[in-house]
């Protein structure tokens, strides 16, 4: 990692209770940052910071789908630490169902959390980040580059997130604001176990082998390194980078590859 870049920086992480978010919290604290944790589960956030100096972190129960919660989160964070250097919009929810079968409320929920949650937090964080010359990070997905079958709401929300962040970057070319779009590939993360099925219920165990996925701790290190280097984009895993590249130059063929790959999942809804 890049030396002491995060030492005494104030980093806010949404979706901080598990998976990539929890790993980001741990890594940022280890690098000397002050960290604000935001998620719906207080108990899980408390577990995430066990053993760390209580003066170095702050926990705020937050549902990013609610604008009022996001406004309160930023007010509490900046009141406590006096500044904000990095906002990591990590909170997210996934789905697994064909669009033809899915209830519209499922897609609405995904947009509210994955897209609007990032918009709300960024809106209230922006004045503070402009003052610090800080960073806005959106944890997107390969699904933000290539539509994934049976994940229509998830892909739509990530495409929207990336479009929003690209606009934000261009609008702030001369302000010093840094914008990073981070796209992990398949990650060993709780987001899949809590993914919504066609009726909005959680699908439970995800039909993929965890051992073949990138650990969230590795993803977190890559993201923080990209922030330190002020990179524009981060696409992780060989499969992820290949998918993005192929979709640019061979879109129809990539459609077939993606379909065939996803159809191999156990209990695939379109196999």
Image: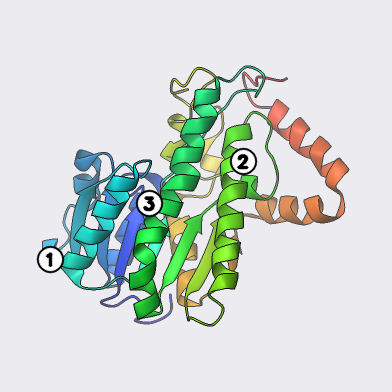
Residue at label 2?
156
Nearest the viewer among 82 and 86 is: 82
Point out the tag, 2 or 3, that comes first from the N-terminus.
Answer: 3
Q: CA distance from mark 1 to mark 2?
A: 39 Å
Tag 2 near tag 3, CB within 8 Å? no
Q: CA distance from mark 2 to mark 3?
A: 21 Å
Q: Secondary structure at mark 2?
A: helix
Q: Secondary structure at mark 1?
A: helix
Residue 214 or 24: which is nearer the viewer?
A: 24
Report the residue at 65% width, 21% height from top.
268
Q: Where in the figure is residue 177, as x and y percent of width and height?
A: 47, 75
Q: Position of residue 27 (x, y in %)?
A: 34, 63
Check disc 3 and report the residue beneath it.
21
| Percent position of residue 206, x then y | 51, 28
Residue 188 seen from this side: no
Q: From the image, tell me which residue sits under label 1.
A: 55
Q: Is residue 167 visible?
A: yes
Q: Is residue 45 left or right of residue 224?
A: left
Q: Tell me if 263 is positioned left or right of 164 in this view.
A: right
Q: Residues within 10 Å of mark 2 (few under 14, many from 20)?
A: many
Residue at x-position 47% and y-position 62%:
137
């Amino acid at each position: 990692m890049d030396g002491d870049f995060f030492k005494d920086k104030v980093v806010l992480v949404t979706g901080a209770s598990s998976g990539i978010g929890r790993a980001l919290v741990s890594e940022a604290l280890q690098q000397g940052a002050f960290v604000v944790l935001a998620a719906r589960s207080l108990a899980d956030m408390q577990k995430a910071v066990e053993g760390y100096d209580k003066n170095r972190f702050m926990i705020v129960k937050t549902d990013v789908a609610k604008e009022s919660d996001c406004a309160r989160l930023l007010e509490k964070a900046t009141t406590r630490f006096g500044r904000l250097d990095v906002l990591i919009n990590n909170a997210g929810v996934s789905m697994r169902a064909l669009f033809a079968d899915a209830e519209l409320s499922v897609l609405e929920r995904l947009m509210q959390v994955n897209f609007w949650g990032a918009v709300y937090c960024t809106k209230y964080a922006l004045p503070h980040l402009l003052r610090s010359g800080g960073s806005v990070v959106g944890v997107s997905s390969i699904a933000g580059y290539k539509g994934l079958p049976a994940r229509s709401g998830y892909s739509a929300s990530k495409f929207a997130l990336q479009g929003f962040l690209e606009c934000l970057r261009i609008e702030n070319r001369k302000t010093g604001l840094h914008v990073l779009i981070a796209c992990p590939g398949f990650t060993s993360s709780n987001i899949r176990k809590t993914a919504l099925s066609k009726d909005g219920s959680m699908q439970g165990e995800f039909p993929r082998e965890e051992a073949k996925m990138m650990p969230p701790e590795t993803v977190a290190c890559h993201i923080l390194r990209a922030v330190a280097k002020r990179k524009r984009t981060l696409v992780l895993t060989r499969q992820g980078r290949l998918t993005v590249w192929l979709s640019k130059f061979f879109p129809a063929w990539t459609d077939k590859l993606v379909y065939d790959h996803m159809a191999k999942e156990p209990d695939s809804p379109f196999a």
